[in-house]
Every structure is written in structure tokens, then in C-alpha cells.
Image (spheres, grey):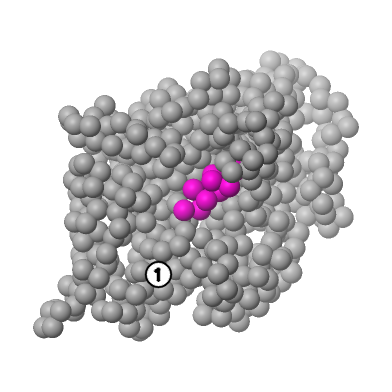
Amino acid sequence: MSLPTALALLGLAITAGAASGPTAGSQRSCSSFGPTPLAGVAFTGTTHFAANTRVNISNVYSSIDETNLPAFCRVELVVTTNATAGTTALAEVWLPDDWNGRVLTVGNGGLAGGVTVTELGHVAIPQGFAGISTNTGHDGDTDDGEWAGPHNDNAIVDWGWRALHLSVLAGKRIVEEYYGTAANKSYYLGCSTGTLKEVQDFPDDFDGVVVGSPANWQTHLQGWSIHMNLNTQPSTSPHFITEDVWNDVLAPEVMRQCDALDGLSDGIINDPRICSFRPETLTCRAGQNASTCLTGDQIGALRRIYADYYEADQTYVFGGYYPGGETEYYKGLVGKKQFDIGLGYFQFMVLNDTNFKIHDYNATVLKITDRIDPGQSNAINPNLTAFAGPQHNGKLLQYVGWADQLISPGNSIHYYTTVDEFTRANTTMDIDDYYRLFLVPGMNHCEADNCMYVQGGFAANAFGAVEQASNDNPPLSFDPQHNILAAMVQWVEEGVAPDTLTAANYVGNNVSNGVGFTRPLCRYPTTIRYKGGDPDSADSFECA
């Protein structure tokens, strides 16, 4: 099915009516909510949660168990994604009693299939947004790809883009029916399996998009993940590097070479591009204990790990790892026996061959993958004029951790650069007017509880993104300087674009332990520099 065909799937010829009965935003209105029938949408339940009552909801991907949320109405939906094939996706719309007039859609991660109830409850509802989320058309955890085979093409398309897009359309109509008025603005907040696809193909869905470390080049990302894995695997190979060596030998040497280059030795490399890390300094000398040094094969593996990745025929695939995330890189891609997401992607979405193993991956497989583009999930089009131009005036904020262990930050830089090049060559627009990228020193992939800890230093990893408040790392406040979602709202609705954000690190990555330090997050291509003063205060740093 073509992308334009999907626009008609929800039968939007119906007329949206105002919510009947009592004023929307109460237990009574929730229990009596009977919206005008929407073609392709089935309502499976509504539940009202009074303020500060227990909200205990879970699925295979996401869960929440809290007793401190504002009052809201939970609406559960089944959205038809392909009427001919009979395929559907689950969706939920959470409607706060005290609504701020906006809609917020929250995303998913990896290959997951499950409504992201965690972020609906920890981000959307506490800030007054009507929240939307989908299971992307299947049930499964982040690493599970079996649902896609054999030849389950409709499910793959649902995961790739269709379930999200149709759930957003349905969710907006539910919001309008419930409150009796359409939302003023529509926003998105997610990380990893993000929504650059929406920005490129469905520019009217969102007015503002905040996406972290997007997996927007799926066909190359999954091959890159296997390539990174094979740089050290199998564990019996001479190039394998143990977790102890990563933590106790490699990480300290990276800090010795790189940490002070930004003006402050604090266990965080603010911009790893200024460090030309030399792994050969760890080469084993005669008589040296092998647990304290590296062999020639291991040195070669590291050079590949920290380099841009090219196939044998010079096809660019992805960026490499950057110095500064060594204590997590082993847990990410280079220490596992196999990387499950990449393996499942090629077994069930590309080749339909469960006998495929990571050692079977090569440049030919990459070409097949690029040709198929499973689920039409690639989102690499640099032309964002329909989203950002004067007819829509959409805004995009993107962030990525410099120490991301699952998706190279080079991917975010690469996409931003291609958009900038297109904008300059084909329009009179300025990329700063609609697209800004923030690199987060020391932070790993998405999750606050999974962020960097090196040599006593932490990343400033609390700034209002997904999987932060839900992991005990909320923003310091909900104002635009400390909360990236509020910064986006201010940019869309007031025209004030964020140049910097102020992120916090909580001691032990837990807000209950108090603030360890704060740091500015700088708009790319500027970077953080220490200018003197209290190293725990963001005021002691500048973006230059």
C-alpha cells in the first residue's frame, strides 16, 4: 500500500462533533464518553483515574505503577491499519482533566510492540498534554523480531510507519471529541525508533518534534550493529576484549588521553572529536601481564570500532564509537554473543531465513536490505521543506549522547549535515530556524539509568526527554531552559528557539539523592567549554 493511500484509512469524511453530555475532563465525562464512530477505529474501553490514585498498567514493552498522577481518562483503541488484510494496531489516548490544549505523542524503541504507558504517565499527563501512543501493530519487547516472519509484510509496515501515523490521526479525533475542541498544537517526544519518518512523509501530523538518537537509517543501522559486534566476536577469537579490559584498562587510558583536552578533568569528554585516541599506547610489552594491556589483534579491533564504517565496496554505512563511553560499549554491541535486534531484523524482515547468523552478514546483504527497505522504515530524506516551510512552520529538536553505545552519534550528525546541505542548496531557509541538534557529553543511548559513569563522573542526563523522569531523572524544572519539551513548545508557540539547555546530573542517577552537577547542552556545531569557576555549575561553562 502506498503512503498516500494510508491517509484515507481512517475515513476522515466523518464530521467531528463536540463531546456530548457533561463537560469533558471529569470521571463522569470519561465513563459516559461515546464518541462519534470513526471508520477504522474500535473503542475497547475507557477508565477514569482520579488524582493520586494508583495507576498500575503494563504490557510486554512498557509499564507504570504510580500513585501521584493528576486525574485523567484512559481511552483504549484498536486502529485498522489495512482493511483488506485485516491488520490492526493498539493505541491509547490519555486525556487529563486539566488539559493544556495540546497533544503529545510518545514513541517506542527498537523492534518493540507495546503502548508506551510509562511515558504517557511520566511525561504527558503530569504536564497537561493529551497523550497518544501505539503498540506499532504487534506485541513484543525491544529485541523481539519473530513477529515479523514469515513474510508478515503488513506487520513490518505497521512497525515501520503506518501504525504511528494512523494512531496519531485517530488520537487527534478522540481528543477533539472528548474536549469539544481540537488541540491547539501537536507534539512528539521519543528516542531511538523515532519519528523522522513522520517529519518527512506526514509533515502535518506534528507542529514540533523532539527526537533522541533516531534509528532513522534502519537498513544501515542494523548492518552497522552486526559489524560492531563482529569486531570483537566471538569470545574465543584473538581480537575479543573482555569487559574487565574495557572497564579497567581501556576506559582509564581514554580518559588519560582525552579528558583534560576540554579544559577540565572531570571524567566527561565534552567533545570527543577533539581527541585522536591512540589505542596502541596499550600494546603489550615483553613480560607484561596480559590483563593490563592489549594485543595487536585487539588494537586492530579498536581502530575499527572507533572509525567510520565502510563496506568492502566503500559503501558508507555508519559512524563509529566515540571515545568516552568505554564502560558501556561492552554492554552495548561489542560484548554480546550476538546483537539480537540486528539478528532479528535480517532473519525476519530482510531474508526470511532463520538460519542467518551474524557471520553471514556482508556487503551483498546490505544491498538487498537497501533495496527492500523493510517496512519503508528508512527516514533519510533531507528535504524537510513541507514540514518546516511557511505552509506548516514545523520545528525539530534532536539530541544524542556522545557515548551512545547502540546508535553512533555520527548518524545524527550525518543526517543533520545532509539536511543542512539540502536547505542551503535548494531553499532560502536557514536550518537554525527549524532544526537544532544537541550533543550530550558522556550520555549513552536514551535512558537516564543507562547513562555514563566513568572515573567518578556522570553525564548531565536529566533534561526532560523520554525515559528520564520514569527512571528517577526528571528535569530540574518544567521551564524551557531545563525541559526540552517546554523548549519545543516555546519555540513553536512563541518563536523563541533554544540555543542551550541546562541538564542535571543527580547523584547515583536518582533525584532523591540530590543534584550532583549541572551542565549546558550546546546547539551543534558549538560545543561545551569550561571557562572557570565551580565545575559543578552550568554557569562555569560556555558554548563556543
Asked whether residue 179 is in view, the answer is yes
Residue 79: x and y, percent? Answer: 75, 45
| Residue positioned most to the top | 23
Q: Nearer the viewer, residue 485 or 522?
A: 522
Residue 440: x and y, percent? Answer: 38, 42
Residue at 69% in and 61% down: 373
Secondary element at image label 1 = helix
Q: Quadrant of residue 299?
A: bottom left
Q: Using the image, determine if residue 214 lies above or below residue 173.
A: below
- State whether the magenta stretch is mostly helix, strand or loop: helix
Q: Using the image, determine if residue 236 lies above or below residue 478.
A: below
Q: Nearer the viewer, residue 211 or 135?
A: 211
Q: Quadrant of residue 139?
A: bottom right
Q: Quadrant of the C terminus?
A: top left
Q: Quadrant of residue 245?
A: bottom left
Residue type of the residue flagged with mark 1 = Arg
Q: Is residue 417 magenta?
A: yes
Range of residues picked out in magenta: 410-419
| Residue positioned most to the front | 425
Side of 148 where 468 appears, left or right: left
Residue at 19% in and 31% down: 532
Asked whether residue 537 is in view, the answer is no
Q: Is residue 152 magenta?
A: no
Residue at 59% in and 52% down: 216
Residue for badge 1: 304
Q: Quadrant of the N terminus?
A: bottom right
| Residue positioned most to the left | 287
